[in-house]
Amino acid sequence: MKTMASELFSEFREHSVSEFFRKNAAMLGYTGKIRSLTTIVHEGVTNAIDASEEIGVLPSVQVAIKKMNDSPEHFKVVIEDNASGIPEKYIPDVFGKMLAGTKLHRHMQSRGQQGIGISGGVMFSQITSGKPTKVTTSIGNGEMIQADVMIDVDKNEGKILNEEKSKGDWRGTRVELDVRDVTYVRSRYGPFNYLRMTAIANPHVQITFVEPDGTLTVFERATDKVPPRPKSMPLHPWGIMSDDLLALAKHTKSRTVTGFLVAELSRVTKAKIKEVQKLSGIDLNKKPSELTWEDAEKIVSAFKQTKFMAPPTEGLRPIGAADIENGMRQILKPEFAYAITRSPKVYRGGLPFVVETGIAHGGAAGKSADEAEGEEGETGGLELIRFANRAPLIFDQGGCAINAAVRSIDWRRYGVDTAAAPVTLFVNVVSAYVPYTSAGKQSIADDPEVLEEIRAAIMDVARELRQYLYRKIRTKERQQRAGIFEEYLPVIARKAAHLAGVEVPDIKKLIEKVAGVKVGGKRETPEES
Amino acid sequence: MKTMASELFSEFREHSVSEFFRKNAAMLGYTGKIRSLTTIVHEGVTNAIDASEEIGVLPSVQVAIKKMNDSPEHFKVVIEDNASGIPEKYIPDVFGKMLAGTKLHRHMQSRGQQGIGISGGVMFSQITSGKPTKVTTSIGNGEMIQADVMIDVDKNEGKILNEEKSKGDWRGTRVELDVRDVTYVRSRYGPFNYLRMTAIANPHVQITFVEPDGTLTVFERATDKVPPRPKSMPLHPWGIMSDDLLALAKHTKSRTVTGFLVAELSRVTKAKIKEVQKLSGIDLNKKPSELTWEDAEKIVSAFKQTKFMAPPTEGLRPIGAADIENGMRQILKPEFAYAITRSPKVYRGGLPFVVETGIAHGGAAGKSADEAEGEEGETGGLELIRFANRAPLIFDQGGCAINAAVRSIDWRRYGVDTAAAPVTLFVNVVSAYVPYTSAGKQSIADDPEVLEEIRAAIMDVARELRQYLYRKIRTKERQQRAGIFEEYLPVIARKAAHLAGVEVPDIKKLIEKVAGVKVGGKRETPEES
């Protein structure tokens, strides 16, 4: 009998995380020729904008996709930013090591958060074309570094193949990825629409895009205001689990539990610590390393019984209603547009988030690029554009909480025929902890509190649309009524005056009063709110 | 300027894969109180069945979920199998190291394939309850090992806390996980339905289940035939990319490229190698380690121009139409059931897969447990049950290719009102390389060839259902017609005979002829095919 197990376990192996994602590239969004190319662009642009914002610089991102001559499915993708640049010693890790980065351990709102993205792009490029990624970077010290980077998937490590240094007065990073087995299309799922959506949600970013056929598009920035720099947002005591507490305790520099709790959590003051000490019965002057699971459970339980200020939300960086509305007006030229930014909410006890929604009616709203180009997908009507921390969510709509919220609404009550109405709905979920369903980060998990808040935010703008549509109908009716009066009242007045042998009276004022419109003036149009 | 980069990169860190999944547990299916519990059961049962099949043993799996008294959301989950048992030295890695296992590097059809599953369960248990997982195992050598296992997430390593050995004549593994923050419900998304669906698709498995309230359910095995042991299925030359080839070359034991290609790929013979050598112009007698990317590209290109036998499919282990039909009949008691197993197909050039579908009408078909228990979800009508390699897919239906295939079909053409019809549709996708969309493995990516084949397989059974429904209507009409004749013809015959002064004739035969039914006999019921 022993042979069964020993035979089976002779096959026991361990894989690196790179090898795992090499085999399961679909989990990172590398599935299909169109989506794979868009994913590469997404990873590069996400990093570029995050890096610029972190150092408080107005992001200028240049993207170019060049067709290579040897195959219709071979492209070069170039993405250049004006951010901090990358110090030489970090180049292999930034581009060649998955689960490594500057953002993954800090609790703050950013587009990336896993330290996988751009390494995934380097890997996809390497497994399709066999070529390294060319990185050019300078931290602004007059020295430019050019390096060719590949990933050693067995070890999850970056390798530098060639490196050259030169003089140059420039700061930023330029990445050049050589990719095969991808297709360029200008559909909803392609890079053009991805960048267009990025521009809508990031009015402070200038994006220059050169398509394979040479077409140059500049998405100009609509504001010169750099969003506030992302802030680290410590966990709130209500959003923490015993295991989180022990994980934090393991890595803290504080020497007592009290010091540690005050330093590492938000809203925890020394006065509150006294309450917690009393409730938990634990000596909080001991070393953090001495905390046991039982201690942690008691502390977490004491937290729940203690009143703290709500989690800080000043680190959240929504786009703002005005900018969403402007963005929609600029791109969609609608008859009506309206947007809101809801006040911050909390899920799972202590994780703050904000939902923003916008709605547009008429103009180019509701008409997805799909229909125009005959791609499969929506059949017209309500168009949903989704964002998380301002990054467009283009794929995996079916499993996304935003989609679930949209579907849960009875749109007829808002006067919207979802199959035909020219309506575009914009939703942006903002949080330091967006609960994505997969490493591809294209879909938000349907946590009940998040789902409910998205739903409420959509209904907020839908109500405004209903009012607009109602006013539009009422105005139309009024105009029809006025038309009838305008036509017949003068005739009646004339005939009556004739019969009575008096002069025909001026009945303009009368008509205006009866019909509620100015006669001969401009037709009343429904105001936009 | 230098400070910008150096400040930013002082935050650069690396995470272990365990830490990554600890923070992103939703990606493994740990999202929500109901789903988290079902995911734990899923991981344990998947491992149990895979392990039994690998050693050719009829699987008997015992599952018990016990409520703990201190909290309504605290449970103990026990899963026991009769498989090979685990050798002592592998215990920490099996339960405490992610991306490690016996299945992840072999190309064969199995339920698990990533080496994450049960370690994920141990991790979830540990982060919610702080408790280790109790493992009892014996490889059948008279020695039983009891060990408490935890994960060191910083290092992605298993730690054994207590270990005891004792004498015992038993072979198998028993895992006991202590989980908090979960809920037990008997809905579509709960463990009971998961096990019921597992039983439908695995008629050779016996599952014993004890629910928290003590209810015992035995899902008896319907067949004593162990499915063939899973076979390693080498990649076919048409399904390989240059990068795969180099990855294989790096790890091969063969000393020449020729030997390596013949040994590691399917359908590659020495005769075919000669063609490849001619087409690629590469000396295939060199060492595998000397292969360059360009060589690999030329070989892959030569493969594409060479005729090979289609990929072997004898390693695929579908359930079989008869067993699917039996399973549906046993559980759903329908009026009509029909199933098919399609012949193997290939996607992405060389990855073989098989789709099986079954359809049931009437009885308990189409009525999901949801409705009965008032859970949210389907609103009745067509019920879809999805499987991949016989493992139930319960979650993430929205983004799954099977769901997309179902939605793409115009069901009215098959006489099915999807909102009301009592129809259950069964789909199982079988492959050594199921293209899952995420590590949670609940959804299949919509690769065009896979999607199209699923669609075709569904239409196969839908057509059969249409015929049944058509026959049913026709029979009903015939019976109505017969009813009319039966009623009036005897009267007419009697009156006519009376008038003519003759004896009343026997008109049974006439009625039978006219109405197409036996008079006074059994009503004709539509045959099932």
Image: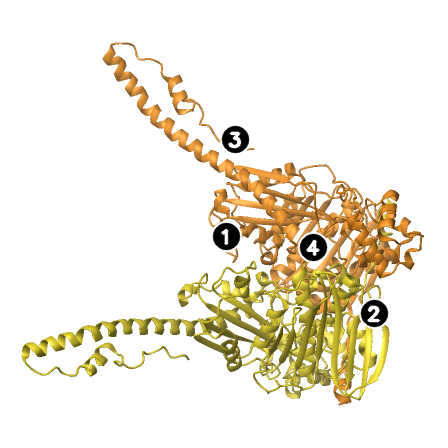
Chain colours: A orange, B yellow
Q: Chain of mark 4?
A: A
Cα gap from disc 2 to disc 1, whole angstroms: 51 Å
Q: Nearer the viewer, residue A171 or B18?
A: B18
Task: Report which residue position mark 3 lands on.
Answer: A527
Q: Nearer the viewer, mark 2 or mark 1?
A: 2
Cα gap from disc 2 to disc 4, whole angstroms: 26 Å
Callout count: 4
Cα gap from disc 1 to disc 4, whole angstroms: 31 Å
Q: Nearer the viewer, mark 3 or mark 1?
A: 3
Cα gap from disc 2 to disc 3, whole angstroms: 64 Å
Q: Indicate the position of residue B306 as horizontal and vertical percent values.
A: 60, 80
Badge 3 density bin: few <14, some 14–19, many ≥20, Cα 10 Å: few
Instruction: Tell me if label 3 and label 1 are in contact, CB under 8 Å.
Output: no
Task: Report which residue position mark 4 lands on.
Answer: A435
Cα gap from disc 3 to disc 1, whole angstroms: 30 Å
Q: Chain of mark 2?
A: B
| Amino acid carrying mark 4 in the image | Pro
Secondary element type, mark 4: loop
> Residue B157 got which mark?
2
Secondary element type, mark 3: loop
| Amino acid carrying mark 1 in the image | Glu
Secondary element type, mark 2: strand
Q: Nearer the viewer, mark 4 or mark 3?
A: 4
